[in-house]
Amino acid sequence: MGHKAKSISLKDYERELARLQIELVKLQSWIKEKGLKVVVAFEGRDAAGKGGTIKRITQSLNPRVCRVVALGTPTEREKTQWYFKRYVAHLPAAGEMVLFDRSWYNRAGVERVMGFCSDDEYWEFLRACPNFERMLIRSGIILIKYWFSVSDKEQERRFQSRLKDPTKRWKLSPMDLESRTRWVEYSKAKDEMFAYTDTKISPWYVVEADSKKRARLNCISHLLGTIKYKDLTPEKIILPPRKELKGYVRPPISEQTFVPQKY
């Protein structure tokens, strides 16, 4: 980790986030117009802030253009398939951006540390992964990989806050709790993963994430800088007047079922 991130005021954060989200809408139009295929992989330790950043990216975007892929545990059948097959099914077509909330790098992280894959499967992944990513890039996909880096002290603080907040408790899976006791093993796995997959053609971009607000702004700003785009915002739209429908009679309100007005 580099320098300790200073806190940023909520007002400054919200103002800058709003500005960046307008730029993301412009980027979305460019991706759609030019038929680009964009893949953004978000990796990092549990509670590092990947999900929160993804939410801020997608907040103002069209889910048909920008979608999130967050795959669960593979089925017994999927475990016997070519490892990358599960992820290939979610790759973008022209005019789409796909955000992977954890990606094929599960094999180099949680699967390695928790013993969910064999040594042979692990080393085969590290050998195959750069070739797989080279194939994606050669096929015309723009691949961007982010690693969210968080200190053990900050991760612990976030775990504790999740325990207290009923809306966040679902985020603490048994796997997350186990990861607390395996900090060093995860560090080693990350170093090994970077040694093999931080390549010139497909580098890892590390996001310092001890400050959630700064991490979100830095990541979005960097993402906008990786794809050259132009503002395709259309001219101001003038709404045409609504036509009067002569002879149209609305059905009686009593025939419809309304949601009770509790508020």
Image (tube, rainbow, N blue to C red):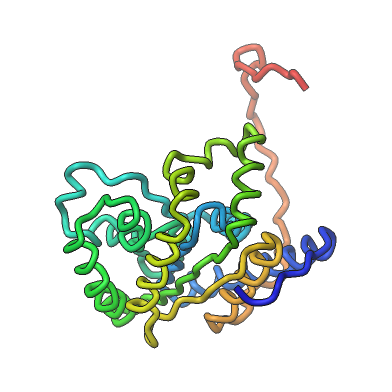
Placement of the N terminus among the 4 image quadrants: bottom right
Q: Position of residue 37 (x, y in %)?
A: 40, 72
Q: Residue 7 falls in which quadrant of the image? A: bottom right
Placement of the C terminus among the 4 image quadrants: top right
Towards the viewer: 116 or 91: 116
Towards the viewer: 211 or 133: 211
Q: Is residue 141 above or below residue 96?
A: below
State the residue at coordinates (19%, 42%). Answer: 76
Q: Which residue occupies the extreme top position in the image?
A: 254
Q: Is residue 165 above or below residue 241?
A: above
State the residue at coordinates (72%, 70%). Answer: 5
Q: Position of residue 208 (x, y in %)?
A: 61, 69
Towards the viewer: 248 or 140: 140
Q: Residue 103 falls in which quadrant of the image? A: bottom left
Left or right: residue 211 versus residue 112 is right
State the residue at coordinates (40%, 60%). Answer: 185
Q: Position of residue 58 (x, y in %)?
A: 57, 57
Left or right: residue 238 versus residue 167 is right
